[in-house]
Each structure stands twice: as C-alpha cells, then as structure tokens.
Amino acid sequence: MNEEQIMFSSGELTLEGMMAKPGTSTVQRGAVVCHPHPLYGGSMHNNVVEAVLQAMWRLGWATLRFNFRGVGQSEGEHGGGAGEADDAVAAVHFLAEKLAIGSENIVLAGYSFGAMAAMNAAPKLADLGGLMLIALPLRMTEGEALKRIGAPIVLAAGDHDNYCPPAQLQAMERGLGSRAQLKIINGADHFFGGYEGELSDAVESMLRGT
C-alpha cells in the first residue's frame, strides 16, 4: 500500500508521519503505530513497525506511523514517555479526522517503548477500538493503565524476550480476562530479527477478532 508523508500537530509541536489508505472509497478501520525508544535509535522506520503495518494493510485498514517528538523531522525533544503518550493521542485524533471515522474504529498499536506510550495514551481516548502492545517492556512498567482501558487488548512478544518475559505477559493476559488476546512467537527475542513474518501473521490473525 502506498504511504504519503504527512505532518500533524501534537500540542504546540509539529510531528511527521506516513499515512496509507486503501483504494476503496470508504475506509472503515484505521490504526496508529508507535515506534520503539527514540534514545536507542527508534523511529517509525523499524522492522517491527513495518511488520505490523503489513498485517494491517492485508486487512484493508488505513494506517498512520509517525515519529515521536524529537525524532527525524518531528519537532521538540524526548518527552520521557509522557510527551510521547500525548503524541499518540494526537495521532489517533488526526487519523480519525482524516478518515472521518470515530475512534471506536481505530486501533492504537505500539512496539517496546512505543507500547508503553500507547498503553498510557489509551485511557485518554474515549471509545478506542483496540490496543495492541508488542514486546511491552514489563521490566519498566507494571501496566497499571490497562485497568482503565475497556477496549480489546492484543499482546505479543517473543519467547526469548528478556525485556518482556513471556510468563509475566501471560499473567497479564489472564488478569485482563476475555478482552485480551496473546501470541508468543517461538524463537524471537525483543527485536524480532528474522521473525517479522511470523509476527505479522499473528498480528493479522488477532486483529481479525477486534
């Protein structure tokens, strides 16, 4: 699917992103995808972000990936997580406006640091259609924000992920009840190198149920 470069506002900052829309006249579903940690080289041009996008495009969804504040051509500087959560909220609002759909038709997704930003953004988004957290760094967060989210939640990680231990993620899924889905990718670590295809297939399968 072809992406176009766009700019949108997050508070007083202007952020850069790339948006894709299917060729159909009416878009019914959309997704925002948040990238990994900016201070460790993370940007919207990331293998996991792109694997997630491929899954969404196969479903015929519109997508928006973007650079957090201070990354690439996005204005500002690293916000320690809180600012990036605000960026994710702004991205969902922007995509909903561009597609002329409600937030109940949008899934907010994130990978690693981006998963934390998405998780913390979700309670600020009324009627969000779903939340996808890939390799949520559980050694850095307890996931308390998830208790304030009523939307379907999709979880994924590799079984060799030291930042997101599978046993902890499985316990989180059990605590969330029927609104959560989980996929553990055998052989993958936190970075999913060589396992992008397996992740993309799993994401597509789980999103069909949201």
Image (tube, rainbow, N blue to C red):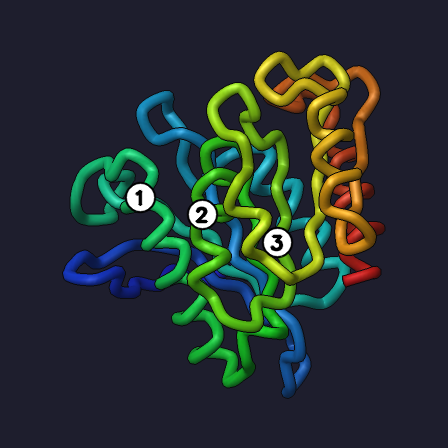
Residue at 15% over, 61% down: 12
Left or right, 9 with respect to 92, comes to left
Q: Which of 44 and 101 is in front in this view?
A: 101
Disc 1 to disc 3, C-alpha distance: 17 Å
State which quarter of the image contains the N terminus: bottom right
Which secondary structure, mark 2? helix
The number of numbered discs placed on residues in the rendered structure image is 3
Identity of the amino acid at label 3?
Leu
Q: Which of marks 3 and 2 is in front?
A: 2
Which secondary structure, mark 3? strand
* Mark carried by residue 131: 3
Identity of the amino acid at label 1?
Ala
Residue at 80% over, 29% down: 184
Left or right, 94 with respect to 188, comes to left
* Mark carried by residue 82: 1
Which secondary structure, mark 1? helix
Identity of the amino acid at label 2?
Asn
Residues tagged 1 and 2 counted as in contact (Cβ below 8 A): yes
Position of residue 156 measured from the top left corner of the image (x, y, whole percent): 71, 35
Q: Does any portion of residue 1 appear in the rendered image?
A: no
- Callout 2: few (<14), some (14-19), or many (20+) C-alpha neighbours within 10 Å? many
Position of residue 76 measured from the top left corner of the image (x, y, whole percent): 16, 45
Left or right, 170 with respect to 65, comes to right
The residue that disc 2 covers is 120
Between discs 3 and 2, the one toward the N terminus: 2
User: Picture quarter containing residue 163?
Assistant: top right
